[in-house]
Amino acid sequence: MPVLLLKNQKKNVGKLEICNQTEISADLNIFGDIVSDDWGKWCDDDTCPSDISDFLKNLEDIQEINLHINSGGGSVFAGITIYNMLKRNNARITTYIDGIAASIASVIACAGDRIVIPANGTFMIHKPTNGYFFTSMNADQLRKDADTLDICQKAILQTYMSKTKEGVTEEEINNLINEETWMVGSDTTDYFDFEVEDSVQAAACTSNYFDEYSKTPKALKQHEEPENKTLDIDAIADAVMEKIKAKEANQRNLEKEKIKAELLGDLDRYGV
């Protein structure tokens, strides 16, 4: 039987905290960027698939999971893996978009049997991308990655379609994906079967990915560092190099291939 926690009490499980656990339910909070593994974390709030795996293993008897999301997105492969983990779990999931569910975080949100968003919440969908960090690739490798991203978009499209209102077509949703579409909560019901609650005062959401999107709202960019703040570039460069040295390139590639393999193995879930 799960250890009972009082309201607002927390229990550490791996890198995550189980919050508000009862005999039948528990809260799962995803409040940072989505990354492939612990090596890729820049903030304590960042989440990777192994975090979710540890969380679920400690909740085998739980019947309900309250999934709270306030995330600017992250790794498409890691996000799809997290989505599949949650969908395989037997618990009924209610997703609460506490502030923002952008990019791959919006896919994770769709793991919920119910999806609740405040009227002033934000939901963003766009084409999957793959960043290259100190990596050289030839034309064949780039084409292979492009093909993989096309497969990802088909999978993501089917995920969104599972939450659309009756009458909404794949073409409509695919166009929204291609255009990088940002929606406030009150507008999501034009396309999706979401429950919209009254506006709330949401916690600020910061993300390393906001600068990478082409249509990020100015309101989100207000949380960036002030222009007059002096940055220690050498210290930042040293920190980056230390992270790179912490893991060999072949280990990173193995992790990436493992995630891709899991994605490709789950294509039947999306009818691809």
Image: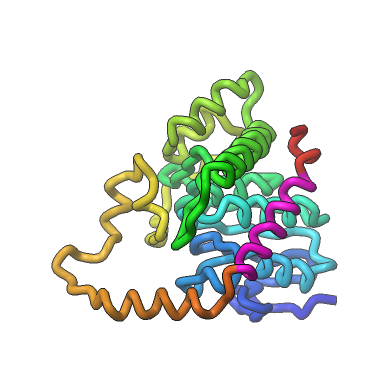
Residue furthest toward the left?
228
Q: Where's residue 18, x and y in %?
A: 66, 73
Q: In which quadrant of the rendered view does residue 63 lie?
A: bottom right
Q: Is residue 216 left or right of residue 10?
A: left
Q: Which is the main secondary structure of the residues drawn in magenta? A: helix
Residue lying at 55% horizontally and 51% vertically, measured from the top left? 105
Observer-nearest residue: 244 or 113?
244
Q: Quadrant of the N terminus?
A: bottom right
Q: In which quadrant of the rendered view does residue 3 lie?
A: bottom right
Q: Does the magenta-highlighted stretch encompass residue 252?
A: yes
Q: Where's residue 132, x and y in %?
A: 47, 55
Residue lying at 74% horizontally and 37% vertically, measured from the top left? 270
Observer-nearest residue: 228 or 1?
228
Residue lying at 55% horizontally and 55% vertically, measured from the top left? 75
Observer-nearest residue: 134 or 154?
134
Span highlighted in magenta in the image: 250-266
Q: Where's residue 146, x and y in %?
A: 57, 40
Above or below: residue 272 compared with residue 253: above
Q: Where's residue 135, x and y in %?
A: 48, 59
Q: Is residue 176 left or right of residue 272?
A: left
Q: Does the magenta-highlighted stretch encompass residue 200?
A: no
Observer-nearest residue: 218 or 66?
218
Above or below: residue 254 compared with residue 124: below
Q: Is residue 206 left or right of residue 162?
A: left
